[in-house]
Amino acid sequence: EQQTLTDASITATNGQTIMKFTKLMSEPGEIEIVYGENRFLWAHGNDATLAHHGNNRAAFSLDLAAAGAAVAEEEVTDPTDPSVEVEEDSVNVPDAIQDPSGGQDCTVNFCDNELTTGFLQKYRINVPDGQAPETCDGCTIDMELIYDGEAWVSIGFSLNGRMIGSEAVIGIPGSTTLKYNLNGYTDNLVQPMPQEQQTLTDASTVFQNGQTIMKFTKIMKEPGEVEILFGDNDFLWAHGSAPALTYHSARSAFVLNLSSGAAQEVTAPNKGLWLAHGVILFLAWGVFVPFAVQASLLRKLLPEGGIWLQIHRGLNTISLALFIAGFAISVATTNKEEQPHFSNPHRRMGLAMFIMAILQVIGGIVRPHNPPEGEKKKPVRVGWEVGHRVLGVSLLACGFWQMYEGILLYGVKYSTDESDEEAITIAYWVWISVMIAVMVLGGAFFKFRN
């Protein structure tokens, strides 16, 4: 009653044995074949008589939903096979690293991984004789990156999918192909490793036939560096828009399993929290603070009776509340990501601004009173006004820089589309330019008119 195969046959044709059948994937009381990853076994004999298979067998995983992605599994020695000498707890590890695109052996042939349109990664694992891939100390990886265009290209090795703290091989067409430490987002923090760590062999980056091609061979396990594993690896890729090594025009993080060839793009966590952080602080420093300053500078346009001071104070109060909320989101999210606080210029500037803003508010509350009209201001009042204005202008300038830096950091962290990032940056600077123009030109006009 369980012999439910249909169209089942086995024939010997042109020197090959061909077995065909159709099977129900889900049958009561039997192992289900799923539309996803399955574990299969294969075996064949030495002739047409059903007998022991000898060494002709193995286990493998096959993902039926991933275009036939197959991965060789550990082959466990059969203790019933008299032809095999069995050691206790022995396991034979396969030498082959399979590529899902066609079942290639990535220790013999180059396997392909498309990073993005027009950017291809090719790799091959070199396993010395007598070594097992998972325990190999002398294994190397040959890698090629092929980019449609002329630009610097890079492949990075990471422990967490983030740029800072990672390492990379960067190739500049017609120039160098070196290992770099990625210590930050700015050019001066991306520096070549010391000469004793420049262990790449057969390294080159050339531009030919409209493509930039970087090639190198790297030791997979090097002291003090990110190890390249036979399992899942966190990689980073990036390329520029020209040969000169400047800010990248495209980049992303991805996980690549060298034992299966399976690649998956990585998305950094907490995107919504960091977006909320940016929006809240833009409202604080890009909207309410400039409006508060304009209320003071353009007070002649407002009704008399000190209404400008009420508007100035109210808008600054709102901006401070938003600043505290945005700062709290930053601290909480940094804790959540288990990252060090105030570890880059953006974070340190944020802390400095927070302290300066609190001092500015306290100074506004305890300010010396303005004398009645017609009386000369006391030196303490004059000194307070100068200090209040200088600190206010400093905070505003820092805020403008912080917001722009935040756009760049968000783009890097979440691999935003370059055109979207450029559009947001342009819109940001247009808005800020309008705010600055109103403050400078309006303030100057009333200053000179008086």
Image (cartoon, rainbow, N blue to C red):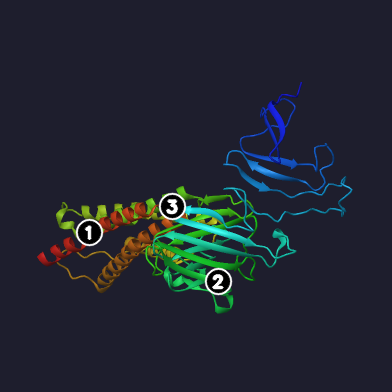
Q: Is residue 447 above or below residue 30?
A: below
* Residue situated in front as seen by the camera: 271 or 370: 271
Q: Which mark is in front, 2 or 3?
A: 2
Of the residues shown, which amino acid type is indicated by label 2? Asp
Of the residues shown, which amino acid type is indicated by label 3? Thr
Q: Which mark is in front, 2 or 1?
A: 2
Q: Residue at x 52, y 51 (%)?
A: 266
- Helix, strand or loop at mark 1: helix
Residue 279 x/y as whole percent:
38, 51
Sequence-wise, which precedes: disc 2 or disc 1? Answer: 2
The residue at the far bottom in this view is 195
Sequence-wise, which precedes: disc 2 or disc 3? Answer: 3
Check contact, mark 2 vs mark 3: CB within 8 A: no
* Quadrant of the frame with the C terminus: bottom left
Residue 408 x/y as whole percent:
39, 59
Labelled disc at residue 159: none
Residue at mark 3:
117
Q: Which mark is in front, 3 or 1?
A: 3
Residue at mark 1:
296
* Quadrant of the frame with the N terminus: top right
